[in-house]
Image (cartoon, helix red, strand yellow):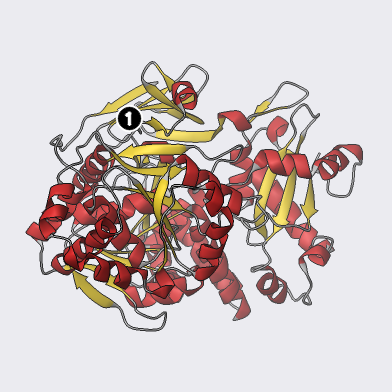
Amino acid sequence: MDEFHSPPVVEIDPSENLSTLLAGRVQSKPDAPLIEHKATPDGPWQSITAREFDARVVAVAKGLVARGVEPGQSVGIMSRTRYEWTLLDFAIWAAGAVPVPLYETSSAEQVEWILTDADVRLLVVETSELATTVEQVRPKAPHLGDVLVLDDGAVDMLVRDGQEVAETEITRRRALATTADVATIIYTSGTTGRPKGAELTHGNFVSLTRNAVAKLGEKVCPPGSRTLLFMPLAHVFARFIEVLVIPAGAVLGHTPDTKNLLADLGTFQPTFILSVPRVFEKVYNSSEQKAAAGGKRGIFQRAAKTAIVYSRALDTPGGPGPWLKLQHKVADVLVLSKLRKALGGRAEWAISGGAPLGERLGHFYRGVGLQVLEGYGLTETTAPVSVNLPDATKIGTVGPPLPGLALRVAPDGEILAKGDGVFLGYHNNTEATQAAFEDGWFRTGDLGSMDEDGFVRITGRKKEIIVTAGGKNVAPAVLEDRLRGHPLVSQVVVVGDEKPFIGALITLDAEALPGWLSTHGLPEMDVATAGENPEVRAALDRAVDRTNQAVSRAESIRRYTVLTTDFTVENDYLTPSMKVKRSLVISDFTAQIEELYANVGDHDHS
């Protein structure tokens, strides 16, 4: 099959916008909790009802009006994920304006580009350090007015400023936007070139969230549902979740620092988790290391294998047999229940997006008791365009299109999307907008296939396809995602364009390395030394061999090199959404790549 349409379950009134979405929540559950937040990292979770949150939104919106923000103007938010981010988002919408997120990790050059391209008139930053970064570029952003600092009481300041503004002005402004109007401009972090500002409408968010709630329904979001947001709100996935909880009737929490994530999961106790595969990989790897440190590696690995086998059996006509059920019960007592406890103890569902999760992890978590619904989407599709459903899951796929969306596989394998979640176009960039569409369908740039039920498999990025000297087309994502699942590995870039075979650049995970060395009876060593260590190399050899089992011999990794430099946001090899800037890596590590093909070393997998 090459095309699948999923009709909307909920029809949206053209006069609706994100403020009416919040008004609906206030009307239906005024005194039930909407948000829980912590005043200090170690403090208790404090509950805010829908009515209280709405009142705070209005008070901050009045402050924005007092500061001169006009309907349709852009207001920037540059901060980590925290309660004030969500408060500001809804306040900017209430003032009739357009929130524009900036990553707090952005360089001065990126900040300058977004401030000028989006014509940001007022900016709220998290810290005085970020305000200093902005001051460097202020002369080149002449329309930028106030820069307020959250840590210096920006929210309280706005509330004080707005005391003289009539509430009727906010009521008027809240009704201005329709489904067709721009709700936000999100700049795609882009692995090449300048970020492009994707214009997402009020209709994109309202239609997609309402239909997602209707489709995922009572199973994922029953009454009392809670989720903890720890992904950056500058990224479309987290932003979608921030809006989704409103019609879902769920409670939202925020974790600014992922170092506190496990502790916050334990105290917040989410019922569903939304994350990227890297977090699920980290939880698995750190759990294995913890078990190994206590001399229980074998017990953990047997329990993990049982969880995977049990999950696979759930997809067979007969289901798990009595012996497997017993094994699974024992594994649960010894290991799996502890993993559920580490995630807060109440989570039954997770939604994973941003990159492929992989079948092994999908089955592992389902065997643990956490069903991971893998989905797929982009900034330009307001996050999810497809997702596996509670009653219709095929592990290894990203599910069928959500209601109101359609997907098509072009003759060259590219996935095309159309429907309620697809963006208006790129801000101030008609040329890029025209290039992004083909006969009304958005060209995702991703390659994949679709089965007869509309379930989609993503196989790689169109622009990243490697063509070897022998003419073999290789999708690097398949290899990279599998190899990155090893606890020692941080990042992988597969190479081999116009070369005789496929190679790989591997970076080691500096955080995981000490634990891995300890559990393998090896002394402490730095990343550079570990990259040359025979036992570390042997472990990587085995990981590469396992990775190669997923592909044909012509597509397999034959040689690899371990770099001493990891790819991070700070050194600009990763985008803020944690995607590797492949072209920059290949350009900067040309010497190491050429060496792969110059000398046949001990680590040749030919």
Give the x, y percent position of residue 31: 11, 69
Give the x, y percent position of residue 397: 43, 39
Among the 4 quarters of the image, the one containing residue 343: bottom left
Q: Is residue 72 above or below residue 232?
A: above
Mark 1 Cα shell of 10 Å, populated few (<14), some (14-19), many (≥20): few
Q: Split into 4 quadrants, where in the image is the N terminus?
A: top left
Q: Is residue 291 above or below residue 558?
A: below
Give the x, y percent position of residue 445: 51, 29
Depth check, front residue: 147 or 588: 147
Residue 497 as seen in the image, left or right of residue 61? right
Among the 4 quarters of the image, the one containing residue 582: top right
Type of amino acid under label 1: Asp
Q: Can you identify the residue that label 1 sits on?
A: 453
Outermost left residue: 27
Is residue 428 at least partly visible in the picture?
Answer: yes
Give the x, y percent position of residue 214: 18, 45
Question: What residue appears at the point 77 percent right and 62 percent down from the top-left corner?
Answer: 536
Depth check, front residue: 357 or 155: 155
Question: What residue appears at the point 34 percent right and 72 percent down from the top-left corner?
Answer: 345
**Helix or strand or loop: what does disc 1 sit on?**
loop
Q: Split into 4 quadrants, where in the image is the C terminus?
A: top right
Residue 48 as seen in the image, left or right of residue 321? left
Residue 175 as seen in the image, left or right of residue 97? left
Is residue 355 at least partly visible in the picture?
Answer: no
Question: What residue appears at the point 78 percent right and 54 percent down from the top-left corner?
Answer: 563
Depth check, front residue: 256 or 370: 256
Q: Is residue 43 above or below residue 64?
A: below
Residue 530 as seen in the image, left or right of residue 417? right
Question: What residue appears at the point 43 percent right and 66 percent down from the top-left corner?
Answer: 327
